[in-house]
Image (cartoon, grey):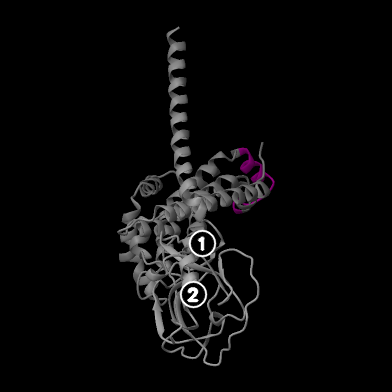
Amino acid sequence: MKREIKDKLLEGITYIASALSVLVLGAILFYLLTNGLHLIDWHLLSSNYYSSTANASVINDYEYVPMSDYSGEGIYSAKWGIAVEDITTSHNEDEISVVYVDPNSPFNHMESTVAGEEGKASSLSEGSLIKNIYYINENGETKFLSRVQMGDAAKLIGILDDQATGIVSCNFQSLGGGIRGSIITTLYLIAVSLLISLPIGIASAVYLHEYAAKSRINALIRQGIDTLTGVPSIVYGLMGVTVLFPITQLVGATSTSILLGGLTLAIILLPTIISSTEEALIVVPQSLRDGSLSLGATKSQTIFKVVLPCAINGILTGVLLGIGRVIGESAALVYTTSTVINDYPNLLSQGTSLSLMIWTIMSGEQPNFELASAISLIILAIVFVINIIVKIIGKRLARSFV
């Protein structure tokens, strides 16, 4: 009777703990969806984080031509052939965005006035944010219309329609707020870290389980691997700066770089990959090895053609854990890749991964919870997709020994 009560009590505690875990995870997911889902679109994934500013004036020989009809989105000025709308950017700023520019519009017949680019063809493109406009009023005077004076989209179109008789110049910028550079940086880090850690980690696990004899030295090696698994990643970051940075300097990296971050992450992943691979090798029955050897196969043939194919699911589990660690790592990357958001990253340049980008945008004076939530959802989506791909690969490559 007492045993039944104890079992029921333990069972109840298990259910309660599981329910609390599900509720906490559900609450986190609900918060991310409600705050960040509306920001996720193709622009967020494909555009740069920093905006590029342009300044252009209407070409001298432009002649006014009647504009075509427009019935799309936004507030349209038939007089100047431009449609705009009010938006809130990923930086939580209210802006006036261009949604349409007529081919005959003066805003489509401009030339750059930026130093070094004078005279180059320029135009107000869809998605641009209008910052200021110089126009000519009815008295022939040149007036300046600032972003504050514009107010909103309706007021801007009203001013241009009622007061402007000609457009002189316009200052505008791209929308920005995208995470394309951080996605590329994350992919670089995954590729570099796995290319280095996978072969070394799998080879080490094969040696420790298949070749190494039981000895005090091998026991110490295993103990060291288990110890490295629990070392804080910030310590690895410091190690990367002091030990690995001279190596990256040899290939042309003059400061912290994505390559340095990838090398550091490779070292972080090694204990996880070694442990998971060795656990997968342990599960493979010894009878398979004995059978292969009895048929005349060498030890290396047995390992590569029998043991490893049977252990592929466990190895891929280690790969999945490694990829998740790379995507979610931030502390070690603060020292090795920097916290500078780079829209055009390469292996020898600085950059931020998706997780480090969250830290960067949340550590400013005005944390951007919505953008951080959107990036978090993208990270979860990437991990989910990679998980499915790894499962599919595992099913295709695995060999059953049951």
Q: Position of residue 221 (x, y in %)?
A: 39, 49
Q: What is the spatial separation of the Cα atoms under label 1 and label 2, in whole angstroms?
A: 36 Å
Residue at which label 1 appears: 44
Q: Which quarter shows the N terminus?
A: top left
Which region of the structure is painted magenta? Answer: 287-300
Element at label 2:
helix
Residue count near mark 2 (Cα–Cα under 10 Å), binned few <14, some 14–19, many ≥20: few
User: Any magenta on residue 291?
Assistant: yes
Q: Position of residue 253 (x, y in %)?
A: 39, 75
Looking at the image, the residue that sits furthest to the bottom is 61
Q: Main secondary structure of the magenta part?
A: helix
The answer to whether residue 207 shows anywhere in this view is no
Taking the spot 40% from the left edge, 52% from the top edge, the residue there is: 369
**Looking at the rendering, which quadrant does residue 258 occupy?**
bottom left
> Type of residue at label 1?
Leu
Determine which of the numbered discs, if any, sits on residue 162 in the image: 2
Please indicate whether residue 250 sits to the left or right of residue 207 in the image.
Answer: left
Along the line of sight, the residue nearer the viewer: 219 or 228: 228
Residue 260 visible in rendering: yes
Q: What is the three-letter code of the residue carrying label 2?
A: Asp
* Relative height, residue 172 to residue 168 (above, below): above
Q: Secondary structure at mark 1?
A: helix
- Give left or right: position of 310 versus 166: right
Where does the C terminus fall, quadrant-wise?
top right
The earlier-in-sequence mark between 1 and 2 is 1
Q: Residue at x 62, y 45 (%)?
A: 310
Residue drawn where x is 36% and y is 64% of the image: 339
Q: Are marks 1 and 2 in contact (CB under 8 Å)?
A: no
Sort mark 1 into few (<14), some (14-19) or many (20+) by Cα contacts within 10 Å: many
Q: Position of residue 251 (x, y in %)?
A: 42, 76
Camera-side residue of 139 and 74: 139
In this rendering, the label closer to the viewer, 1 or 2: 2
